[in-house]
């Protein structure tokens, strides 16, 4: 007997990142993480910067998302992400450099510093590194 699955589509403004049948995933909801199994109740929620953790055929993997929305309906889930990257597509050196730049900006305390922008850049860089297991 095969396990029940659900379709998960992850799209950004640029392209479709993922579109496959999976068993389970955990999304970084704006109010906390949500686990979604097939036949989940219909919902729409905002997503924050975080990892979309996916379980498919006994394998587990991560996709880094930088906000967006999740809709679940009729055993189909759609993530409309501001940005999303599979762990294997992340350039670790580039993510490390972005993290260092954001940390330096925040440490500089210059009067024209956009603190919120620097904090968000730091969160995105850290999230991308987490997706790769670092």
Image: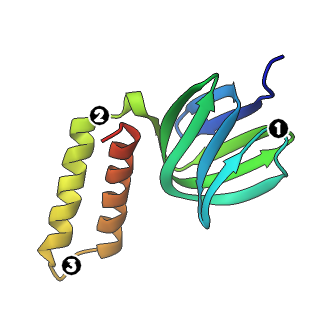
**Disc nearest the viewer among 2 and 1:** 1
**What residue is rendered at 21% in x and 78% in y?**
112
Residue to which mark 1 is pinned: 75
Q: CA distance from mark 2 to mark 1?
A: 33 Å
Farthest top residue?
Answer: 1
Residue marked by disc 3: 112
On the image, the x and y values in percent for residue 95 come to 27, 44
Tell me where residue 88 appears, x and y as whole percent. 39, 27
58 or 130, nearer to the observer = 58
Residue 128 locus on image (x, y percent): 37, 45
Nearest the camera: 85 or 59? 59
- Residue drawn at the location 41% of the way across and 33% of the way down: 87
In this view, 113 is above or below 59? below
Q: Is residue 46 left or right of residue 82?
A: right
Q: Residues within 10 Å of mark 3 (few under 14, many from 20)?
A: few
The outermost residue toward the bottom is 111
The answer to whether 103 appears left or right of 22 in the picture is left
Say which of 55 and 28 sits in front: 55
Local SS, label 2: loop
Closer to us: 117 or 52: 52
- Give the residue displayed 18% in from the left and 67% down from the top: 105
Q: Secondary structure at mark 3?
A: loop
Tell me the quarter of the picture where residue 107 sits: bottom left
Give the percent coordinates (x, y) of residue 86.
Answer: 46, 33
In this view of the protein, can residue 54 be seen by the observer? yes
Residue carrying label 2: 91
Residues packed near mark 2 inside 10 Å, few (<14), some (14 to 19) or many (20 plus): few
Q: Element under label 1? A: loop
């Amino acid at each position: 007997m095969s396990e029940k699955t659900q379709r998960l589509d992850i799209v950004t403004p640029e392209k479709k990142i993922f579109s496959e049948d999976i068993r389970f995933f955990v999304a970084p909801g704006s109010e906390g993480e949500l686990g979604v199994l097939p036949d989940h109740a219909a919902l729409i929620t905002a997503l924050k910067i975080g990892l979309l953790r996916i379980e498919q055929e006994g394998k587990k993997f991560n996709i880094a998302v930088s906000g967006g929305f999740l809709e679940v309906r009729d055993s189909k889930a759609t993530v409309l992400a501001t940005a999303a990257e599979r762990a294997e597509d992340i350039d670790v050196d580039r993510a490390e450099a972005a993290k260092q730049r954001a940390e330096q900006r925040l440490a500089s305390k210059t009067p024209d510093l956009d603190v919120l922008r620097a904090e968000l850049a730091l969160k995105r860089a850290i999230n991308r590194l987490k997706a790769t297991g670092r």
